[in-house]
Image (cartoon, rainbow, N blue to C red):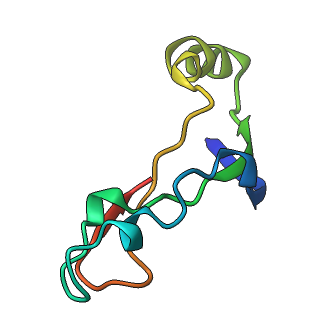
Amino acid sequence: MIVITRTGYARNGERLNNLNNEVKYELGPKNRLYHLMAPVPVDINYEVSVIAKYQADIDKIASNFMVFFNSDLYVSCQHPKYEGIKMNN
């Protein structure tokens, strides 16, 4: 079993860029350029644990699966303000 536990998350203001781009360059009140919308940078901390009955199983998981873990995590969600817009974060 592989257990992923979120240990914390926080908004990272240092990586925030072009906060009001979507308003500054909008074509009109109903025609916004959604590709200019600034994402909200979030730091997510997590821990990964491996639980198995035999040590050999843990070794297989560590050598075949866990080597592909990196610090990036991607989440897809609906935009909280505008309907019908899917955000890939």
Is residue 77 in view?
A: no
Q: Residue at x 42, y 84 (%)?
A: 81
Q: Residue at x 28, y 58 (%)?
A: 35
In the displayed structure image, the side of residue 9 where residue 84 appears, left or right: left
Which one is in front, 72 or 4?
72
Return the x and y of residue 60 as percentages of the image width and height: 57, 15
Return the x and y of residue 14 as percentages of the image width and height: 74, 47
Which one is in front, 47 or 86?
86
In the displayed structure image, the side of residue 88 where residue 34 appears, left or right: left
Q: Residue furthest right?
A: 7
Please tell me whether residue 63 is drawn above or below residue 52 in the rendered image: above
Please tell me whether residue 57 is drawn above or below residue 83 in the rendered image: above
Please tell me whether residue 36 is drawn above or below residue 51 in the rendered image: below
Is residue 11 in view?
A: yes
Res. 55 image quadrant: top right
In the displayed structure image, the side of residue 52 where residue 28 appears, left or right: left
